[in-house]
Image (tube, coloured by chain):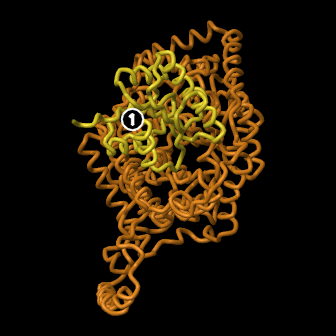
Chain colours: A yellow, B orange
Amino acid sequence: MDEKKIRVLIAKPGLDGHDRGAKVVARALRDAGMEVIYTGLRQTPEQIVETAIQEDVNVIGLSILSGAHTHLFPKVMELLKENNIEDIVVIGGGVIPEEDISELKKVGVDEIFTSGTDTRDIIKFIKQKVK
Amino acid sequence: MFNKDEIKKVKQLREEWENNALRKTLERFPERKEKFVTGSGKEVARLYTPDNLEEFDYIKDLNFPGEFPYTRGVQPTMYRGRLWTMRQYAGFGTAKESNKRYKYLLKQGQTGLSVAFDLPTQIGYDSDHPMALGEVGKVGVAIDSLKDMEILFDDIPLDKVSTSMTINAPATILLAMYIAVAEKQGVSPDKLKGTIQNDVLKEYIARGTYIFPPAPSMRLITNIFEFCFKEMPQWNTISISGYHIREAGATAVQEVAFTLADGIAYVEAAIKIGLNVDDFAPRLSFFFNAHNDLLEEVAKFRAARRLWARIMKERFGAKNKKSLMLRFHTQTAGCTLTAQQPDNNIIRVTIQALAAVLGGTQSLHTNSRDEALALPAEDSVRIALRTQQVIAYESGVTETIDPLAGSYYVETLTNEIEKQALEYIEKIDKLGGVPRAIEQGFIQQEIQNSAYQYQKEIEEGKRIVVGVNKFQIKEELPKGLLKVDPEVERGQVERLRELKETRDNQKAKASLDALKRAARTEANLMHYILDCVKSYVTLGEICNVLRSVFGEYKESVKL
C-alpha cells in the first residue's frame, strides 16, 4: 500500500506581497513528497480555513512579512477552533520577533520558522507532527 | 582597446603560463572549489586578460561620462560635481510619527525624503476597511486623505526637499495629494522635485500591491506621464523597479532584463496613446538592487545603463540625450540581511552600497542591520546613513569617475550581462511583451526557479552565508525592537470617521461622481483625482470608484 501523502496548504494571509519564502517552502515540501496547495496573495483568515477544510489538509503554513501576524495568525486559530478542527498542524513563517513567537504558540500555532530557516528543518518538523 | 598583435602575444604567453607555472601550482595546491560562480551563479574564470576583450571598442562600448551609451555614467563629472542623494526609505505608524522621523533624518544630513506607505494605502483601502485590519501603519505610514498628507509634510518645505514615494497602483492619488499639500505651502507643481514609483508591472511580477488589471493600470501610468510633462517638469514620473524583482529571487541578469522589459512596455504604452518619446522619456527613472557580489553588481549597473541607451536610441528612435540616460536609485538587498548576528548586516550593507556607488547610482538607500527582525530602530537607521557618508567622504572612490572601467573582469561581466539580458528581452518580445509574459507566468516562473536554486545552494553548503550556515554562534534574540502601537489603527479609524463627518460631503460626492464618469471615457484622470483629494475624498473612496469601473486584477498562481 502507498503511504498517504501529507497534504499542506501554504497561505499568504493579509495584504503582504512578499511571497518568495512561501513559494520556496511550497516547492521544497513538494520535492519532499508532500501534496502542496498554494493560495496566492491576499487571503482572509476565513478563506484560508475554508480552503484547508475543502482540501482536507494536514498542515497549514502561514507566511507574513508585514507585521500583521499578531492579528491574522490568532484569527486563523480562532476559526479553526470554531470549526472544531484540532488535527491540523499550523506553522508560520516570516519576519516575526521573538516576543511574538511565544504569544502565537500560546494560541495554538505549532511552530514559527523565521528568516534563515533550512527547509529541511520544516520538512522534518512536519513529518514528526503528522503521523 | 588592444591591437591584434598584442592579443596574440597575450594568448601565447597565457598558454605558456597555464602549462607551466599554473599547472605546477594546481598539482600541489588544488583550488578551493571546482567551479567558481558569481552571486547570481554565473561562472567566473580564474583570470581575465586582454583577450577576453578582443572585440572591445572604447568609444562604442564605453565612451566618456555623459556621452552615449553612458556606460561610465550619466553626468560628465559624476560625484566630483555632486554626490548621490542619500535617501533612506522611512515611514511607519501615523503621519505625525513619520513626520518626526523625516525631520530627524534631514537633521542627520539626509538629502532627500523617501516615503513608505502601509499596505492598505498601497492597495487602495482606507484604514477602516476589513482587509486593513492588523495592517494599518505596519510597513509604512497610513494615509487615508489629504488631511494625513498635510500632517506628514508639516514644516517640511516642499520646494527645498526632493521626495520619493513608494506608491504604485494608487500613484495618481498620492501624487495629487502631494501637489495639494504643496499648493497650501504656496509651492506650484513645476517647482516640485521627486519620484513616484508608479510601476505596476513589477507589482504583478514580484511585489504584489496591484489593484487594477494591466490595461487600466497602464492608462493611469500614462496619464501621469502626460500630466507631468505639462505641469511637473522636474518630477520623475515612474521608477521602473528591478529592486523587488531581485528580492523575489532573480539573478543580476534577470533583474536587468525584466526591469528594462518593463521599461519597454511603458514606453510602448505611452507612444500608443500619442505621446512623443522625447516628451516623457527624460523623466523615466529606474530603481535597482545592490546585492553582495561587488563586481558583478558594478557590472550590472553599467550594463543596464548601456543597454537602456541602446534600446531608446535604436528601438524607439529617441533623440533627446536625456531620453537615453538611465538614471537610477539603489537600495541595498534586504534579502541578504540575516536575523542571525544582525551586526554583520552592517558589513553586508557597506559592500552593497559601495557597489551602487562604483556603479554610478543617483541616489541610495542603505538598509538597517535589524531589518530581518523588525522595523529599523533609530540608531540602526543612523548607522545605515553613516555608512553612505563614510563611503562618500572617506573611501576615496568618489574622486574619479567610474574607477573600475577597463578592468578585464568588470568589462567582460558588463558585456555578458548586457548580452544575456538582451536575450531575455528578445524572448519576452516573442511572447508578446511583458503583460502577456506575466499572464503566462513566464517571468514569475523564471524568478521562482532562481530563488529555489539559491535556497538549495545554501542548504547544500555550496553557498556560504556567514552566521547562518557557517560560523554560527548561540545567541539571544534581541529584545526591544521597534513595534507599531496597535493604537495607531484605532486612532486612524477615528480620524477617518471625523473627516467624513466634517468635510463638505456634497462637494466630495460631486467630485467622485465626476471621476467615475471620466473613468468610463478615455480622459486623463489626473485633474479629476486632484479635485477629489482637494475635496477630502479618501483614498479608499477614490479606489472603490475606480475598481467599480476598471475591475480588479487576479493573480495567476503557478508553482
The residue beneath circle 1 is: A131
**Under tag 1, what secondary structure?**
loop
* Mark 1 neighbour density, 10 Å: few (under 14) some (14–19) many (20 or more): few
Among all residues in the image, which is located at the extreme top? B506
Residue at point 36% right, 41% down?
Answer: B265
Does residue B38 appear anywhere in the picture? yes
Q: Could you say which is closer to the camera, residue B421 or residue B31?
A: B31
Amino acid type of the residue that numbered disc 1 sits on in the rendered structure: Lys
Residue B448: x and y in percent read 37, 45
The relative height of residue B545 versus residue B234 in the rendered view (above or below) is: above
Asked whether, in this view, residue B506 is left or right of residue B102, the answer is left
The relative height of residue B359 versus residue A10 in the rendered view (above or below) is: below
Residue B58: x and y in percent read 40, 73
Which quarter of the rendered picture does the C terminus of chain B lie within?
top left
Does residue B308 appear anywhere in the picture? no
Q: Chain of mark 1?
A: A
Which quarter of the rendered picture does the N terminus of chain B lie within?
bottom left
Q: Quadrant of residue B488?
A: top right
| Number of residue marks | 1
Residue B206: x and y in percent read 43, 40
Residue at point 64% right, 59% down?
Answer: B83
